[in-house]
């Protein structure tokens, strides 16, 4: 453990203007506050925050950050208070300590909830001050270094998984690759001990590997020097988790991996990076598909470098990274390089671009599981680059679609997207974007996010925004539906009810307000009889009544969205113009059936109080019907059917052959029509076709 003067001297060595008195006060305060507390290793507890501060001095961070590291556990684990911290060390330090403090006292029911609550706190805190994240990462790194002292295996594995899923990706996203690699290695050793031991043992068995790395590094250095390029060249084996991941993804053994060695050439200028690349490619053949230019298109965390893989022998493939000293500092320390190397001044409230995306996801997430799902998407996915029409570079995960691109530019653009052009060609929104594509989003102010977008949206930001809108729309439509059902109930009461009676009814039903009552009615959490009894006791026949009076007024479904406020039943597929009835399902809204559907009784049981008389609105148009067409088994028959359907301005959405023999075959066709009258005319035209034996609505 660092002594007090050693820690202070470290800070003063790179920052002579640091507040020495504050650092000394913080050291003494932490020692006194933690007192006789012990860690699992048996060491005094205060040794942990001191070591965390020591890790951050290696990054040459400012005195406020070091002070925060020294104090980061005092509020949670001792009698110290936030007010006391603010009084002694200032508002900035107090806010950062609060942001870093682990939330062990949160009463979470599941592991995912606990992880999500921690992540929620970090996102909010680091959106104000990125230094909070730097302290937290150093805290987690030291905890991982001492993980083996924890006696319970299940606790060690939980901490390791949390590190692998949250903290290592966070370190990667701010460019702190050394932190990321060490966290991944330590977590990998705990989560997959057998794989870790196997890989490290087999790497150690390559006795001449160290000599080979040194020899290849000297060869690369000599090659560049002869070309007049001064470079620092070094090499290393890739860390065990990186190797295991490659083995797992490529389904190969370690011996089959030809790129377990990585080399780095550090040169003076950006121009020399490209000169060095040319020299290397003239000497050794390039491995196809393995060149990446992160100088012209930096990673979102600011990482810049040239990556190439070359064959230097018959069975030897190596990766070479080429960068300047400034790029190397950024690669090693990420955002911390701004402090470490006094680069462009970084304000404490500097917000890394992707953090604003995560905060937006945080605001949209409804559950801990959803928050973790979306943040992992945002932190983990491999990246591709796409360009806006103005040449702006947008980074996206592999598999992203124009919807993800639109939300990556701005939430409003995503909400209003109706189509896209990729490289000048109009494409559907579900089209996968390729690296280097130019993407233009077509928008309409009347457009809103659609439920089917969730099937092809990839980024956490897009999925969170779509879900948020759909939840808001779903609630608004539930309220509208509940209002219509409530009005119908009111009309069936013997006499009108006043505002006082409604207030009393809401209280009697143990609800909070009128909106809660309307939602409960729409979701069938309350029967008509219960609502009537609450509004006017005895109006539904008393407490033993199981169904409301049958007199009902039809309600329209105009303006409500299928799949949100109601579902068109798959069994009968009603279309506008059909006589319809709704079945209220508890917690799920209404299922809309054709009145003649044989499954109504099965779905509804014996409780006719679940029935809702429905009517299509005057403007309702468009539906999907299922028709069964029996054709003669002869060439051109199916083409003739398609011609008839097209001639009647209907659209085939799906086709399946149900039955076939030597004479006839029957096809089940899903067809988009305007309304029931349109469907009737289409069926009549199909029956008149020479190739058709019969056509019926299925």
Image (tube, grey):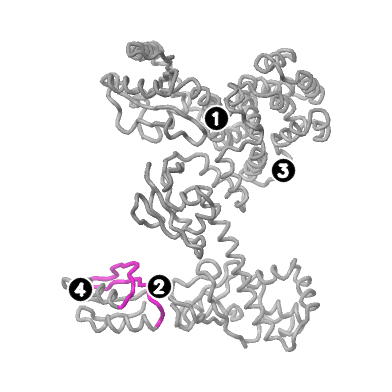
Residue in view at x 29 percent, y 26 percent = 286
Q: Is residue 550 above or below residue 170?
A: below
Q: Quadrant of the N terminus?
A: top right
Q: Nearer the viewer, residue 22 or 590?
A: 22
Residue in view at x 50 percent, y 59 percent = 416
Q: Which image quarter: residue 51? A: top right
The extreme front residue here reads 390
Q: Is residue 581 above or below residue 425?
A: below
Numbered marks: total? 4
Provide the residue designation for mark 4. Answer: 637
Mark 1 residue element = helix
Provide the residue designation for mark 1. Answer: 187
Q: Which image quarter: residue 660? A: bottom left
Q: Earlier in the sequence, mark 3 or mark 2?
A: 3
Gap in Å between the C-alphas at discs 2 and 4?
23 Å
The verdict on residue 640 being magenta is no
Q: How many residues crowd mark 2 within 10 Å: few (<14), some (14–19), many (20+)?
A: many
> Is any part of residue 321 visible from this angle?
no
Rendered image: mark on residue 297 = none
Q: Earlier in the sequence, mark 2 or mark 1?
A: 1
Q: Earlier in the sequence, mark 4 or mark 1?
A: 1
Depth check, mark 3 against mark 2: the one in front is 2
Q: Position of residue 5 (x, y in %)?
A: 74, 13
């Amino acid at each position: 453990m660092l002594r007090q003067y050693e820690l202070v001297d470290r800070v003063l060595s790179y920052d002579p203007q640091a507040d020495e008195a504050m650092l000394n006060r913080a050291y003494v305060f932490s020692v006194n506050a933690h007192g006789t507390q012990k860690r699992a290793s048996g060491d005094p507890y205060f040794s942990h925050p001191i070591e965390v501060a020591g890790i951050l001095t290696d990054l040459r961070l400012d005195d406020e950050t070091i002070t925060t590291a020294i104090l980061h556990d005092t509020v949670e684990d001792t009698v110290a208070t936030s007010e006391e911290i603010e009084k002694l060390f200032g508002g900035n330090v107090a806010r950062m300590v609060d942001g870093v403090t682990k939330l062990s006292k949160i009463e979470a029911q599941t592991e995912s909830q606990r992880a999500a609550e921690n992540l929620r706190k970090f996102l909010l805190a680091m959106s104000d001050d990125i230094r909070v994240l730097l302290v937290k990462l150093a805290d987690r790194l030291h905890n991982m270094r001492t993980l083996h002292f924890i006696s319970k295996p299940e606790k060690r594995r939980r901490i390791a998984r949390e590190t692998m899923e949250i903290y290592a990706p966070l370190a990667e996203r701010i460019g702190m690759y050394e932190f990321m690699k060490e966290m991944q290695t330590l977590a990998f050793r705990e989560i997959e001990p057998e794989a870790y031991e196997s890989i490290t043992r087999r790497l150690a068995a390559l006795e001449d590997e160290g000599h080979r790395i040194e020899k290849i590094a000297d060869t690369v250095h000599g090659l560049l020097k002869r070309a007049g390029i001064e470079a620092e060249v070094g090499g290393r084996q890739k860390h065990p988790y990186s190797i295991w991941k490659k083995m797992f993804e490529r389904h190969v053994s370690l011996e089959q991996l030809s790129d377990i060695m990585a080399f780095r050439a550090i040169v003076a200028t950006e121009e020399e990076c490209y000169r060095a690349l040319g020299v290397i490619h003239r000497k050794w053949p390039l491995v196809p598909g393995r060149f990446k230019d992160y100088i012209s298109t930096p990673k979102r965390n600011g990482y810049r470098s040239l990556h190439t893989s070359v064959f230097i022998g018959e069975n030897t493939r190596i990766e070479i990274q080429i960068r300047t000293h400034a790029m190397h500092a950024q690669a090693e320390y990420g955002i911390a390089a701004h402090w470490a190397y006094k680069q462009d001044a970084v304000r404490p409230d500097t917000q890394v671009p992707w953090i604003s995306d995560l905060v937006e996801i945080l605001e949209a997430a409804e559950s801990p599981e959803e928050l973790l799902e979306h943040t992992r998407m945002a932190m983990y996915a491999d990246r591709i680059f796409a360009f806006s029409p103005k040449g702006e570079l947008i980074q996206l995960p592999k598999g992203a679609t124009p919807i993800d691109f639109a939300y990556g530019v701005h939430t409003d653009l995503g909400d209003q997207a109706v189509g896209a052009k990729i490289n000048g060609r109009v494409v559907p929104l579900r089209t996968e974007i390729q690296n280097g594509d130019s993407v233009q989003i077509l928008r309409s102010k009347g457009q809103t996010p659609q439920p089917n977008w969730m099937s092809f949206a990839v980024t956490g930001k897009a999925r969170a925004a779509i879900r948020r809108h759909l939840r808001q729309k779903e609630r608004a439509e539930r309220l509208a539906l509940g209002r219509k059902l409530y009005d119908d109930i009111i009309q069936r009461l013997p006499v009108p009810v006043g505002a006082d009676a409604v207030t009393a009814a809401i209280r009697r039903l143990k609800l909070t307000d009128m909106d809660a009552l309307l939602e409960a009615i729409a979701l069938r959490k309350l029967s008509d009889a219960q609502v009537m009894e609450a509004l006017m006791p005895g109006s539904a026949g008393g407490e033993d009544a199981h169904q409301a009076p049958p007199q009902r007024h039809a309600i329209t479904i105009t303006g409500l969205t299928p799949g949100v406020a109601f579902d068109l039943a798959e069994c009968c597929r009603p279309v506008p113009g059909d006589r319809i009835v709704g079945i209220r399902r508890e917690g799920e809204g209404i299922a809309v059936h054709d009145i003649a559907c044989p499954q109504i009784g099965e779905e509804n049981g014996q409780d006719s109080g679940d029935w809702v008389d429905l009517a299509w609105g005057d403007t309702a148009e468009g539906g999907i019907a299922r028709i069964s067409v029996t054709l003669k088994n002869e060439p051109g028959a199916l083409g003739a059917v398609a011609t008839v359907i097209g001639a009647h301005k209907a659209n085939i959405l799906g086709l399946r052959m149900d039955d076939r023999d030597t004479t006839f075959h029957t096809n089940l066709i899903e067809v988009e029509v305007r309304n029931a009258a349109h469907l009737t005319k289409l069926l009549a035209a199909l029956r008149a076709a020479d190739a058709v034996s019969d056509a019926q609505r299925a």
